[in-house]
Amino acid sequence: MNLKLRLILEPMINNMKAVKFIHFSIIFVTFMLISITLNGQIQPIKKNILFLMVDDLRPELSIYGQNIISPNIDKLAKTGVTFNNAYCNVPVCGASRASILTGIRPTNNRFLRYNASISKEAPDVLNLVKHLKNEGYITISNNKITHLKKDISDWDEEWYPASKGWRNYISKENIDLETNGEHGYPYEFPDVEDEAYFDGQTAAKSIADLKKLKEQNQPFFLAVGFVKPHLPFNAPKRYWDLYDATKIDLPKNSFFPKEAPKAAQHNWGELRYYKGIPKKGAVSDDVAKKLIHGYYAGVSFIDAQIGKVIKALNELNLRDDTIIVLVGDHGWSLSEHGLWAKHSNFKVALQVPLVISTSDISGNQHTESITELIDLYPTLCDLANIEKPQHLDGKSLVKILNTPNKKYDYSAWARYQKGETLIIGDYVYTEWQQNGEQFANMLYDHSIDKQEIKNVAKNKQYESTVTHLSTILNQRIKAYYDNESKKN
Ligand SMILES: [Ca+2]
């Protein structure tokens, strides 16, 4: 309605002499119309949302005490709350993204794999994009937000960079290998501008969008999906050059815990695809360090793109009206537990970085409360001042944002294939189940073993703890599936 009013009044104003005064009046009236509905009720202003989703980003950032050069994310964290214990609900791209965007949990027959589909597996669920659109938001997806293209039909715009292949190789060596039917290397470091890669293009597109959105009279949901540090670890040379290769070490837990069950293993096929990686067995220490170097370069590359987008937001004076969320879709093993990639129930594959920044909260805060990615949907509803749909499985994190120093008694439940993981207090407990029967389990006590080196599930000292955690986990699973079957 306020847009119509402006269309009628603005030509009249242009013909009048007291332009400044009348413009002020129009701005005031428009503001009042946004704030007051026809029945006279005050409507809260709906904030914009800048949703920054980074593919395969584990908490490998300086805000988590890691030796990573990420000045722009550091700066963002100074204006928001950093979640020190945020977990995905399923450690694989498409499934995790489907769960985040629908606000419902993965189950043993939904959101299982990298190519999970919202439109096929949860077609009747009111997804976040549709909900925001119904609430008057302009919705834009730039590059990878859902794993499958056109999986959500509700975007006003779904944009992807022009591409000859998702691996986005630029170096002649990798392009020649792929052209000859071979596989490229899991990294490259050409001396090119940021815009040579998808993520530089995605930042540029998002900045152009912000300039257009600034002129619109609607709140926006701008979802920006960066694809590094996903394999292959391609990044412009200057981001590799930020790190001294001779100072990169392997983690202390780069071996499979001898007490852990076989069910916790996987063959990290995602990495083995690439040239120079053996089909079986471990990679050499030199290759491992090169891969870690590549991951770091990818993180710093992404950090620079995030910096550009937030700088544009600030320069357009949109920051106070915009909620910023920075999140990864799942964790990643950089040789921890002798594994690479996601696809496991170890904490390193489940934990994600999460920063939420909005002008309504105090910045430069960390919270230790345990949170899950299904919490994002209800949190964004609360922060945007819109209703939370009934179907949501997660909880709003607004209480945490308001009192980050208080440790709330929350827990997380994640799953991957047959493994169900409960993260509660200092414990990360996993059970593998077949037809409801447990066939393997593992427990890590983070009060003494943050790196998950020793599985203590069979340790006498932890017998009652395991019984207790198993009871909680299985009660939770049963309650959830009972409730699901009632819905169907
Ligand atoms: Ca991913």
Image: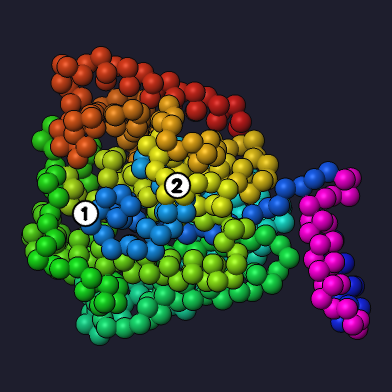
Q: Nearer the viewer, residue 43 or 197?
A: 43
Magenta-span inclusion, residue 24: yes
Q: Is residue 295 visible?
A: no
Q: Position of residue 120 (x, y in %)?
A: 55, 50
Q: How is the image coloured?
A: rainbow
- What is the secondary structure assignment of the residue under circle 2? strand
Q: Position of residue 443 (x, y in %)?
A: 24, 29
Q: Nearer the viewer, residue 403 or 18?
A: 18
Asked if residue 359 is positioned above or below residue 13 in the image, the reply reads above
Report the disc number at residue 228: none
Q: Is residue 26 left or right of residue 237?
A: right
Q: Are marks 2 and 1 in contact (CB under 8 Å)?
A: no
- What is the secondary structure assignment of the residue under circle 1? strand
Q: Is residue 48 left or right of residue 249?
A: right
| C-alpha span from label 2 to label 1 | 26 Å
Q: Nearer the viewer, residue 166 or 43?
A: 43
The residue range painted magenta reads 15-40
If you read the primary sequence from the N terminus, does the residue marked by circle 2 or circle 1 appear first? 2
Mark 2, other Cα within 10 Å: few <14 / some 14–19 / many ≥20: many
SS assignment for the magenta stretch, majority: helix
Q: Residue at x 49, y 28 (%)?
A: 481
Q: Residue at x 50, y 28 (%)?
A: 480
Q: Residue at x 15, y 21 (%)?
A: 459
Asked if residue 177 is positioned above or below residue 331 in the image, the reply reads below
Q: Locate the C terminus by quadrant.
A: top right
Residue on which disc 2 sits: 81
Q: Nearer the viewer, residue 94 or 349?
A: 349
Q: Residue at x 65, y 65 (%)?
A: 156
| Quarter of the figure with residue 28 | bottom right
Residue on which disc 1 sits: 334
Circle nearer the viewer, 2 or 1: 2
Mark 2 residue type: Val
